[in-house]
Image (tube, rainbow, N blue to C red):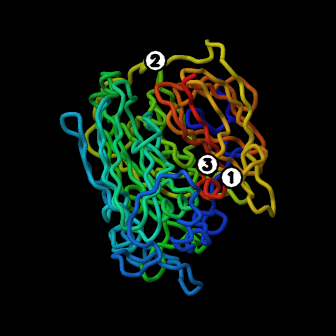
Amino acid sequence: MNDPEIPTKSEPTTRLSRRAALAGGAALGIIPIAGWQLSARARQEATPAGASRVPGHDPAGTTHDHVATPTAGPARTPIADPLAYGFVQGAELSEPEVRQSKDGLLETTLTASMGLTTVAGMPVTALTFDGLMPGPTLRLNAGDTLKVTFDNQLDQMTNLHTHGFHVSPGGNSDNIFVTIDPGATFAYQYDLPTNHPPGTYWYHPHHHGLTNPQVGMGLAGVILQDGIVDLVPGLASYPTKLLAIQALQFDTDGVVLPGSLRTDPMHLVNGQWQPVIRIAPGEIQRWQIANITAGNVYQIALENHVLTQIAADANPFDSPHEQPEFLLGPGERADVLVQGSAIPGTYQLRHLMWGMGSQFTPDLVLATVIVEGAPVTSDPIPELLAPFEDLRLTQPDRQREIVFQTVENAENPYLIDGRPFDEHRVDQRVPLNAMEEWVIYNTSEEWHPFHIHVNDFQVVAIDGEPYTAHSYDDTFLIPAHGSFTMRSRFLDFTGKYVYHCHILFHEDHSMMGVVEVVDE
C-alpha cells in the first residue's frame, strides 16, 4: 500500500493535505513554565509513594553546588537574527563526541547541568550532558552492557530513558519511575540482548512533569548500535553520517529560552546551524537522522534527490524504500541512503511546510548539501535488507482500543481513555509473550506521536485501511481525528513501563499510560 494521504516515516506524503508540525513559541509548547518554576522540594513532596528515589542534597537548599536554572521572566528577549548575533551558519558538518564500547562494555558518566556549551560556533548557556550539545554519542553492539553513572547537577529532579531499547524496565535499567534528586548520582545498567536490533537510538530525561523542559532546553543525545552491515553486507561500503536534530532559541544574553518565550527557534543539526554536508556525484552515503526535539515534527526532503529509507526507529527494513520526502515525528529516527546527484551543485536539506492550526510550520533549511568532485561509482543498493516477522500472519491473543484526546479548558487537557496519568494505576495488563493488537485512536485536532517503551510494534492499518510496514516502530504519529492499528509481542521482560504522546508537553500534562507485563 502506498497511500499519499497517509504520512508516515516509511511512506511519502502529499504536502497539500497532510501537513502538521509544532510551531515555535507558545504554540510549540516546549516548556511548561509552571512545572519548571516549581521548587524541587514541592516536586519531591508531590512524588507518588512507591517511586524510586535517589537521595541527594536538600532540594530546597541554596548551599549545594548546582547551576541555577534561569527563570522565564518577561524581560528576556529572544534573539531574532542568529546571524547578526554571531551564530555561525554553514560550517562543515561535525559529529558529537563518540564513546565506544570495548570488550562488551561501555562504562561512562553523564552529568546533567545548566552551564556553558557551544551552539553554532557561539558560547551559550543551556541544559547539557557533559557540557555538550547534543550529548555524547554512545556506541554499542548487540549483547553489550551499558553502565551510566548519572550525575544530577540540575536544581531539579531528573532521570534517564534509553529511547527504543528492548531491555528490562525495572531496577536500575530503563526504569522511568526512578527519581534522581539534585546533587545525587545513580548507577544505571542496561544489558542489551544478543539479538538487539542495530540502528539509531537516543537518550533523554523522563521524569514526569519535567521531561519536556529538560529535553526542550537541550538534554538529549544519540545511541548508535552497530551491526546492520552484518545483516546486510551490501551496505558496508557506504560512508555514514549522524544528523541529530534539535530546536533551540536563546535570549540576547545567550541563555536558552523556555518554549513559552520562543519566537523562532533555530533548527540545529549536531548543534550546528544549517551545516554543510559534502558528497561526490554518484556517491552513496548512509545518514542516521534522529529527531531528538521535545515536540517538533519534520517533513524531510533533499532538493532534487530521492531518499532511500532502510530503517526506522533502529529497525532495519525488509527492503529499501525510495521516497521524495518522509515524516519524522519527535523521538523518531530514520536511516536513509542518499546518492549524490550526477549534476554537481548546492542542494538544500529541508523541512517542508507541514501542518494546520497550532501545528503549522513553514519551510525551513536544515542543512546544505554540496555535490562536488570526481564522480564515484558506489556499490548498488541491495534489493533485500533484513526480514522481520510479519505479525499480520498471526492471530492476536487480544485486541484493545486506546484513545488519545484533548479536552478544552480542563485541568488535565491531555488524556488517554479519558483519564490523566497515574503511575499507581495499571492501564493495560499484558501476559508475557502475548501478541496483541491495539487500535490507537486520536479524537483531537492535533497529531500525536504514540511511543511505547521496551517492545516495538508493527503498524498493520492506518485509519482502518490495511498498511504494509517495512519494519517495526517504537514511535508513530496518529493522524488528527484518525487512528492506526498496531501489533506487538511483549517479550522477554516483565514489569511496568509506559506509553505516551511524544510531544513531551502533552506527556508531562498527563497524556501517558502504564502497561504492566506479567508472567501468568
- The image shows residue 44 at horizontal and vertical percentages of 53, 65
Q: Residue at x 33, y 39 (%)?
A: 281
Residue 268, image quadrant:
bottom left
Q: How many marks can you see?
A: 3
**Do tag 2 and tag 1 residues touch (Cβ < 8 Å)?**
no
Circle 2 residue:
387
Secondary structure of the residue carrying numbered label 1: loop
Question: Label 3: how many residues lie within 10 Å, few (<14), some (14-19) or many (20+)?
Answer: many
Question: Label 2: how many residues lie within 10 Å, few (<14), some (14-19) or many (20+)?
Answer: few
Q: Is any part of residue 302 visible from this angle?
A: yes
Q: Which residue is drawn at 34% across and 59% down?
A: 185
Mark 1 or 3, which is nearer the eye?
3
Circle 1 residue:
355
**What's the amino acid at mark 3?**
Glu
Circle 3 residue:
423
- The image shows residue 132 at horizontal and vertical percentages of 32, 62
Q: Which residue is drawn at 49% across and 70% down?
A: 249
Q: Distance between the residues labelled 2 and 3?
A: 37 Å
- The image shows residue 145 at horizontal and vertical percentages of 29, 37
Secondary structure of the residue carrying numbered label 2: loop
**What's the amino acid at mark 2?**
Pro
Residue 253, image quadrant:
bottom left
